[in-house]
Amino acid sequence: MKESILRFDQRQKYVVFDFETEGLNLIKSRPWQIAWTVYEGKKKIKANNKFLAYKDLGVSKGAQKITRFDERAYRAKAEDLESVWELFSKDFYNEDHKLVGHNVLGFDVYMVNVWRKLIGLAPDYSFMERIIDTLCLERAIQSGSPESLDIDDFICWQYKWLSTRPKGMKASMKACIERYGLGGDSDKLHDASYDVEKNFEVFQKQLFELEI
């Protein structure tokens, strides 16, 4: 059950994160870009946009098209997996931080553990109770879920909405940006750093439609 309404808590810290990957396989597709930004309330504390180095990166044609993958630019910026993990994990596994993303319960949480496996770490889903998935929030909002929620198990509530796909509903990040009138450049979507920025703007709007 929630302890406070997040829209009023300007001390709460968030890690908003997003991966770009080789493909959509939840077990084998490797992440090659990770962006995460730390906020306190509405204030940006720090932003990171990192590329993960592989000798044999194999981005699928579909993923290349969607993300506008440029191998030369990627190679110029790519860094060692373990060094980036050290930076990312300090923020991500900080128990005082809530973790925000769009469809992260359906995809990105698995990429965290793909990354862990690649550097020899055991699977770890201990962060799950801190996840806030803006896709789930959006589906609940558009379906007319009551503004004031009394939720004993927030993660289960989100999984319910993750698996609920009302016919005709548009809840993609692009659709959310348009619905909330946030503007921006749709051609930049699927670049992890841009997605993080717009996702937090969407999340701030959602906080005034659902009391979580």
Image: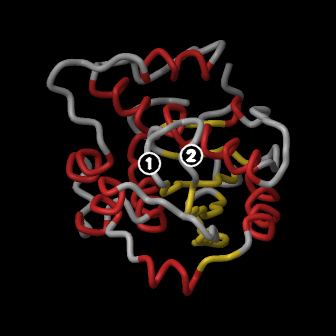
SS assignment at label 1: loop
- In the image, is residue 197 above or below residue 31? below
Instruction: Give the quarter of the image for residue 7.
Output: top right
Q: What residue type is labelled 1?
A: Gly
Q: How far apart are marks 1 and 2 (CA)?
A: 22 Å
Residue at figure coordinates x 82%, y 43% from the top left: 95
**Dot in front, 1 or 2:** 1
Which residue lies under the disc numbered 2?
A: 100
Q: Is residue 179 left or right of residue 47?
A: left
Marked residue nearer the N-terminal end (1 or 2): 1
Please give the residue where the numbered disc 1 appears in the rendered image. Answer: 23
How many discs appear?
2
Which x, y percent locates residue 177?
Answer: 28, 53
Q: Nearer the viewer, residue 88 or 169?
A: 88
Q: Which of 91 and 72 is in front in this view?
A: 72
Decide: is 147 above or below 8: above
User: What residue is drawn where x is 49% and y is 38%?
Assistant: 25
